[in-house]
């Protein structure tokens, strides 16, 4: 069992290990938005506050879209993420590019 803390929505949701974030967000009401769902638009950009090591590996799409220093700070593309196990805490309020 894994869990996601959607901090902007003050919501913690329990999920099966290995769930795709985009599918979880389809099922529940959270304010994280998705666009292309393929890792090329950046609409789903978020920051991992806790549990980086519980997430799937950084994809080529994320390496292409995000800067290395952004990845280092915990930014990811939500459409690319799977929660492998354990607890993960996410935010996206300040992660949008201006
Ligand atoms: S929805 Fe477009 S990059 Fe994730």
Image: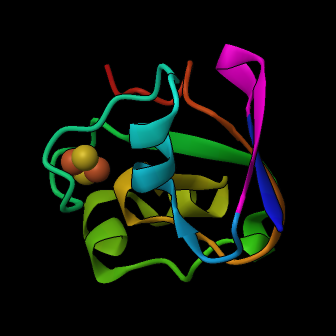
In the displayed structure, would residue 97 be above or below residue 26? above
Range drawn in magenta? 6-15
User: In this image, 96 relative to 24: left or right?
Assistant: left
Q: Main secondary structure of the magenta part?
A: strand
Quadrant in the picture for residue 71: bottom right
In the displayed structure, would residue 18 be above or below residue 24? below
Q: Is residue 53 one of those drawn in magenta? A: no
Q: Residue at x 39, y 65 (%)?
A: 80
Q: Nearer the viewer, residue 38 or 14?
A: 14
Instruction: Tell me residue 75's x, y (percent).
Output: 55, 51
Question: Could you tell me how many numbered marks the image carries?
Answer: 0
Q: Is residue 9 one of those drawn in magenta? A: yes
Q: Nearer the viewer, residue 56 or 13?
A: 13
Q: Residue at x 61, y 77 (%)?
A: 18
Q: Say which quadrant the C terminus sits in.
A: top left
User: In this image, 67 relative to 75: left or right?
Assistant: left
User: In this image, 47 relative to 27: left or right?
Assistant: right
Q: Residue at x 52, y 41 (%)?
A: 46
Instruction: Tell me residue 61's x, y (percent).
Output: 26, 72
In the displayed structure, would residue 48 be above or below residue 98? below
Q: Say which quadrant the N terminus sits in.
A: bottom right
Q: Residue at x 69, y 68 (%)?
A: 16
């Amino acid at each position: 069992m894994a869990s996601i803390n959607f901090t902007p929505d003050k919501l913690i949701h329990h999920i099966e290990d290995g769930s795709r974030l985009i599918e979880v967000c389809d099922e529940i009401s959270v304010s994280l938005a998705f666009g292309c769902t393929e890792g090329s638009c950046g609409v789903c950009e978020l920051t991992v506050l806790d549990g980086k090591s519980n997430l799937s590996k950084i994809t080529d799409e994320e390496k292409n879209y995000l800067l290395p220093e952004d990845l280092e700070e915990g930014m990811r593309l939500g459409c690319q993420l799977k929660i492998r196990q354990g607890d993960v805490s996410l935010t996206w309020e300040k992660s949008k590019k201006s």
